[in-house]
């Protein structure tokens, strides 16, 4: 990868991935792009930022050519909760956007494309615990349906055109940088903002809703590791299972209370409960461990300590 384009660069994952990529490949070699302008110069200060709608194929082609891009991290997407409220938008962005990226990958002879998938690919008729790499994919959320379709079309481009396309099924990603963009696992980030501010948190999932999760540092590590893996050694391509931990809101609250004993939580499940109930409880990521050496660093205790440490500092400085 010599010249990289990150689409969806202002999002929860993109805003941190771009920093890691610029550190490794050089700021001038990593171009940020998003539908939204970088109004507070979050990413544009040190490097190039382009405004682009991934559904506008001609404009995307112009940007790829203008910067001699050879690799793309395509992170632009509509997540599960926003997707349930606007299925057509979710379909258009997630399916047509990915299709444009893949098609331009073939047309312009790009070296590598990374498109994340999600644990939302699972739904009906699948084991809830330690779900396997090649288990049944029957999601019930529109977001999950777009993610399964995205995986299948990536694999089609690998087989049909020899395009180097890769992806990971992220669990819920927990971070202290950029707020999440409208998913079902967002509670596991929001809860920390309330905790460090001394506020009671109202959780939109019930206390016993078990979901797989991962701290952002591990998410970046996994993404970079897969992106740099030897293509010839990969037996799978578009949807590697990865995970780091699984917990319920009640278990996370208990972990927070170990550091902030006065922390309080109440539960008022909303429409996101049905999405969470359709998902699995834990993931078997042994295939990623075998094919490209995946291993997480953060468990629930280490993640909680780091989230509270960083967000407490931000709160003291009046930044949140
Ligand atoms: P996000 O919602 O935080 O960010 C997505 C970014 O894409 C936003 O900045 C948005 O402005 C941009 N975008 C939306 N529509 C666009 C368009 N038409 N053209 C260009 N840009 C557009 O999402 P994220 O959490 O950073 O997720 C990145 C990827 O990882 C997605 O594919 C998502 O499905 C996947 N994923 C995320 C999580 C998670 O917990 N964050 C978990 C599983 C999978
Ligand atoms: C969401 O909740 O929609 C995302 C995801 C697990 O894909 N965080």
Image (spheres, grey):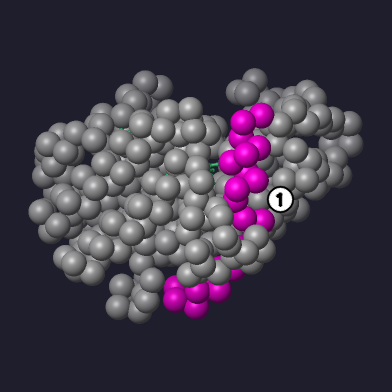
Residue 8 found in image quarter? top left
Q: In the picture shown, does residue 231 fall above or below 283?
A: below
What residue is rendered at 60% in x and 48% in y?
Answer: 278
What residue is rendered at 35% in x and 52% in y?
Answer: 149
Quick one: which residue is furthest to the front in this view? 125
Binning the other alpha carbons within 10 Å of mark 1 as few (below 14), some (14 to 19) or many (20 upward) gives many
Residue 282 found in image quarter? bottom right
Quarter that holds the C terminus: top right
Residue 211 painted magenta? no
Quick one: which residue is furthest to the right in this view? 261
Magenta-colored span: 270-297
Tell me residue 24's x, y (percent): 37, 56
Residue 274 painted magenta? yes
- In the rendered structure, the answer to whether residue 139 lies left or right of residue 258 reads left
SS assignment at label 1: loop
Tell me residue 66's x, y (percent): 12, 41
Tell me residue 79's x, y (percent): 47, 38
Q: In the picture shown, does residue 230 fall above or below 190?
A: below
From the viewer's side, name the closer residue of 88 and 266: 88
Quarter that holds the N terminus: bottom left
- In the rendered structure, the answer to whether residue 295 lies left or right of residue 88 reads right
Asked whether the viewer can see residue 139, the reply is yes
Asked whether the viewer can see residue 220, the reply is no
Q: Is mark 1 within 8 Å of ligand 2?
A: no
What residue is rendered at 85% in x and 40% in y?
Answer: 257
Total labels drawn? 1
What residue is rendered at 34% in x and 26% in y?
Answer: 36
From the viewer's side, name the closer residue of 317 and 163: 163
Tell me residue 218's x, y (percent): 55, 56
- In the rendered structure, the answer to whether residue 274 lies left or right of residue 10 reads right
Mark 1 highlights which residue? 210
- In the rendered structure, the answer to whether residue 175 lies left or right of residue 105 reads right
């Amino acid at each position: 990868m010599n010249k990289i384009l990150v689409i969806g660069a202002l999002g929860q994952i993109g805003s941190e991935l771009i920093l890691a990529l610029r550190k490794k490949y050089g700021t001038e070699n990593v171009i940020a792009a998003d539908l939204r302008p970088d109004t507070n110069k979050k990413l544009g200060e040190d490097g190039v930022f382009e405004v682009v709608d991934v559904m506008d194929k001609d404009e995307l082609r112009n940007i790829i050519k203008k910067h001699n891009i050879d690799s793309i991290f395509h992170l632009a997407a509509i997540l599960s909760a926003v997707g349930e409220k606007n299925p057509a938008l979710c379909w258009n962005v997630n399916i047509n956007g990915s299709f444009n990226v893949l098609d331009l990958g073939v047309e312009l002879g790009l070296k590598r494309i990374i498109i994340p998938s999600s644990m939302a690919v699972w739904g009906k008729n699948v084991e809830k615990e330690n779900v396997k790499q090649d288990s049944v994919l029957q999601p019930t959320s529109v977001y999950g349906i777009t993610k399964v379709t995205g995986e299948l079309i990536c694999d089609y481009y690998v087989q049909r055109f020899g395009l180097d396309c890769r992806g990971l099924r992220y669990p819920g990603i927990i971070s202290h940088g950029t707020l999440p963009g409208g998913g079902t696992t967002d509670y596991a980030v929001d809860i920390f903002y309330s905790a460090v501010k001394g506020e009671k948190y109202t959780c939109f999932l019930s206390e016993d809703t078990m979901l797989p999760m991962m701290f952002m540092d591990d998410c970046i590590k996994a993404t970079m590791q897969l992106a740099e893996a030897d293509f010839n050694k990969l037996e799978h391509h578009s949807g590697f299972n990865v995970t780091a931990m699984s917990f319920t809101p009640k278990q996370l609250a208990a972990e927070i209370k170990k550091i902030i004993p006065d922390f309080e939580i109440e539960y008022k499940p909303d429409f996101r409960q049905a999405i969470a109930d359709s998902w699995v409880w834990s993931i078997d990521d042994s295939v990623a461990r075998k094919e490209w050496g995946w291993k997480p660093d953060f468990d629930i205790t280490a993640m909680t300590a780091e989230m509270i440490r960083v967000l407490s500092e931000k709160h003291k400085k009046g930044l949140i």
